[in-house]
Image: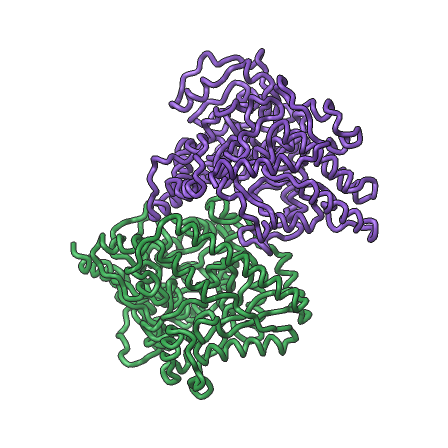
Chain colours: A purple, B green
């Protein structure tokens, strides 16, 4: 069968999975989808309330017998159905399976007066990278349609054991290797706040669904870690959540004793004005709370970006292009940003050299931190930085991912904190802008205060490798200072 | 200059570093070198006593002012000089630098009445893989002679900061990739117990020196870890010694509550009789102490051995052979056992596939452990196994390293425990032997009760990844039950 027919058949299966009574008239003109859950009339007041509660509240109520999993699952399935119709975010939708599982859990609870685990009855959405037995895992590839899993991912097993209910798999870019969510199966997933903006990637479908509240961020690391995933997956480091680390940083927070570094520009690409303002806002809030915030000189980030691009492209795209060839589907345009098909595959000894370079760079970065600490006589708790040079971006305009990829190369901990929204009256074009690089010019040229009006901004909080306890606590505190909730 | 001349010049520098007054008449007939420290008359009674004490005792005495670092360093330098003359174990010997450092440390102590760190004044030998500023690091390659380091290894920095004194770098096989210590610079390092036996490899020079007490095992992980090496080296996982883990297993030990698995054969190569007896001895001792010991079925070890060989050889030996080509030296014969030059370099996508296979195998092994625990209703604390199929081996006879390499592939924790010695009256040839594989036949054919009389035997204690606290405690207990000291 031709790839277009295979993709169309899969797309029609996803659409057909939405029960007729949950289908809506598609709005034509609105750029934002955010009002539809209320306006469509599809969800009852109780269902709206459920889908707008926190995961913690929901599991507490189910565990206390104040809510059933069927009620909660129905609410999220309805809202996810709406989300998919409005922003095109699902690669698999299976409300019937979810509701059957919810019913079983409710029956278990009724009989035993206890839960099966800490996530008893909570619907959890999964990106279409995780494997569930009996379902497809497309990773955005047409070639993987029709290959049904006979096994499941370790995280899926652990979440299931903890009592989670699965009901939807969310969209991803073809191959995952892109920062916008587009594939040849269902096309583009858009941002629920503004359909002209991207939802990001590779977890873009997940981001769109959750911000629409058709899904919930509910997987606390402490809950997963309680199940000792390292007993099942050799890649997981056997490290439980270290409460003492969290307590230590919390006591610094309480006494105004944090020391944070910050940078607004990585030396490659200057962020758009709303992002620079986001960094400045966070720095000011943290300083006003009595903590110390010192400028951090990003150590050779352009080198890091070049190096990780070389590593990403080390097989010359063979892995991706072979998978595309198998079905005949074309590459999405975004892939060329990361995997340049004109690059030839490099040799294994060159890969080893690149890995050695990476290790050397990581050690040099650690040395730079040590030098900073010595110079200032402090312990550096974390660094505030942009995570992208732009607010939620217009489609096909994501050109530079170096703010994230340099941190990936370092294997450092990073937690993203939403800050505020672009404001055309404050975030005017940077008249003094002089490009550092060609890509810098390209990125800055994309800024248009009108087009980005209201686009959400964020920063990342960066810590050394495996310092999640510390970085999460700092991100949480910054969220509190911003009077925001923290997304991670 | 021709490679032979370069190697000869380096060798003569090593020999010349031994002061005339520390040189001895070379014995002709003795197979063992172990009696020479006493018989040579080179060391005073005090120096003999010092070099036969534990590292812990030495650092305590120096810290209490009861010994000087100069006295200790002199004693170890003399004994190392003897070792090198008898078993050919050094690739660099620098007693003058060591003694100058010892003098400085003694002066510091005299002035400040305190030590610079927990290893103050302790001589530490380093394998010629670690980098020390101003010295060569040959890794057994002629090509690396004459390249003087401008930087040092992180471990060297940390040991130096802790107060260690360096005085010798010990021999390694060319490229490190062999289990016997032979290179084209100084030739072969032999076993101090019997010059017909190998000292092993890649840390063979270190093993020979330490068993001769020309060096000391003194680098406790707890001491190193106190210096938080992960702040300097990105490859180090930020995990301090977990006392609670050690305490938990110690309480099991105290109550006879351990559950250990064991295997004597990995399904590829049957060990020689002295090794099988070593495993049986340990099993019996542990059972007699009240613990539970259950047969463990090694999970697909032949597959693991094939897979890790494929990964070792993935560049077709390019890295090694290019280095050899640079100087013109030939490959040592041992390398062909691991790096088959007839194998062609594999493709990066094939390497990725091998890495995926490795991950899959690791997860399957974890699942096998889970199944074992479920079946027997126990928690598996560790596994007792051979570490080599032979006792200390005759030269050029090391053919099968799968007992170690399968555990390496798993990235599991392994601690080696010496058990006893081959005994020709007990360890008779296995008359019922039927080879499992070609290599099995080859290995078993090497067994000769006469030739191996008195050769030391050992087992390894294996635990899951990053379970050092648990495995060390169990190894220590097994050593205690054997009335041995534990080498790790």
The residue lying furthest to the left in this view is: B1
As drawn, is B115 to the left or to the right of A284? Answer: left
As drawn, is A351 to the left or to the right of A29? Answer: left
Decide which of A297, A376 is in the foreground and name it: A297
Q: Where is A192 relative to B470, above or below?
A: above
As drawn, is B24 to the left or to the right of B64? Answer: left
Residue at 65 percent across and 30 percent down: it is A83
Residue A481 placed where, x, y %?
A: 66, 26
Q: Say which quadrant the N terminus of chain B sits in.
A: bottom left
Residue B395 placed where, x, y %?
A: 32, 73
Residue B129 occupies which quadrant of the picture?
Answer: bottom left
Residue A390 placed where, x, y %?
A: 52, 23
Decide which of A348, B428 is in the foreground and name it: A348
Using the rendered image of the protein, determine whether residue B138 is visible from the camera's viewpoint. Answer: no
The residue lying furthest to the bottom in this view is: B425
Q: How many marks?
A: 0
Residue B192 occupies which quadrant of the picture?
Answer: bottom left
Q: Where is A204 relative to B452, above or below?
A: above
Using the rendered image of the protein, determine whether residue A46 is visible from the camera's viewpoint. Answer: yes
């Amino acid at each position: 069968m031709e790839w277009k027919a295979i993709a169309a058949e899969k797309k029609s299966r996803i659409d057909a999975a939405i029960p007729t009574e949950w289908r809506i008239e598609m709005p034509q003109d609105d750029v934002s989808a955010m009002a539809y859950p209320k306006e469509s009339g599809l969800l009852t007041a109780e269902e709206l309330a459920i889908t707008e509660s926190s995961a913690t509240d929901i599991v507490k109520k189910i565990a206390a017998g104040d809510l059933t999993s069927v009620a909660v699952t129905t609410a999220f399935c309805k809202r996810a159905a709406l989300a998919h119709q409005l922003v095109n975010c699902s690669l698999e939708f299976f409300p019937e399976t979810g509701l059957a599982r919810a019913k079983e859990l409710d029956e278990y609870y009724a009989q035993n007066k206890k839960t099966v685990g800490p996530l008893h009855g909570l619907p959890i959405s999964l990106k279409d990278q995780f494997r569930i037995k009996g379902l497809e895992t497309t990773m955005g590839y047409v070639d993987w349609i029709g290959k049904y899993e006979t096994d499941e991912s370790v995280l899926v097993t652990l979440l299931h054991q903890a009592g989670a209910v699965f009901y939807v798999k969310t969209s991803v870019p073809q191959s995952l290797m892109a920062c916008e969510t587009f594939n040849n199966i269902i096309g583009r997933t858009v941002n629920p706040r503004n359909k002209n903006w991207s939802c990001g990637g590779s977890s873009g479908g997940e981001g769109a669904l959750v911000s629409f509240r058709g899904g919930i961020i509910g997987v606390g690391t402490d809950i997963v870690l309680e199940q000792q995933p390292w007993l099942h997956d050799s890649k997981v480091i056997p490290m439980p959540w270290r409460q003492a680390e969290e307590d230590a940083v919390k006591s610094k927070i309480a006494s105004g004793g944090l020391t944070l570094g910050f940078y607004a520009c990585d030396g490659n690409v200057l962020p758009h004005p709303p992002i620079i303002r986001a960094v400045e806002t966070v720095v000011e809030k943290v300083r006003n709370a009595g903590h110390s915030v010192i400028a951090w000189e990003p150590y050779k980030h352009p080198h890091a970006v070049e190096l990780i691009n070389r590593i990403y492209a080390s097989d010359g795209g063979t892995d991706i292009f072979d998978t595309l060839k198998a079905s005949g589907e074309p590459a999405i345009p975004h892939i060329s940003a990361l995997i340049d098909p004109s690059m030839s595959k490099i040799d294994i000894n060159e890969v080893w050299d690149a890995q050695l370079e990476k290790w050397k760079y990581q050690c040099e970065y650690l040395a730079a931190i040590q030098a900073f600490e010595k110079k200032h006589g402090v312990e550096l708790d974390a660094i505030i930085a942009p995570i992208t040079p732009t607010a939620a971006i217009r489609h096909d305009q994501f050109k530079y991912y170096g703010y994230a990829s340099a941190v990936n190369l370092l294997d450092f901990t990073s937690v993203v904190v939403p800050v505020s929204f672009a404001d055309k009256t404050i975030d005017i074009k940077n008249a003094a802008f002089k490009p550092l690089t060609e890509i810098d010019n390209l990125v800055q040229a994309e800024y248009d205060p009108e087009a980005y009006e209201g686009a959400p901004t964020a920063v990342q909080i960066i810590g050394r490798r495996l310092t999640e306890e510390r970085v999460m606590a700092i991100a949480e505190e910054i969220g509190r200072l911003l009077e925001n909730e923290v997304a991670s």
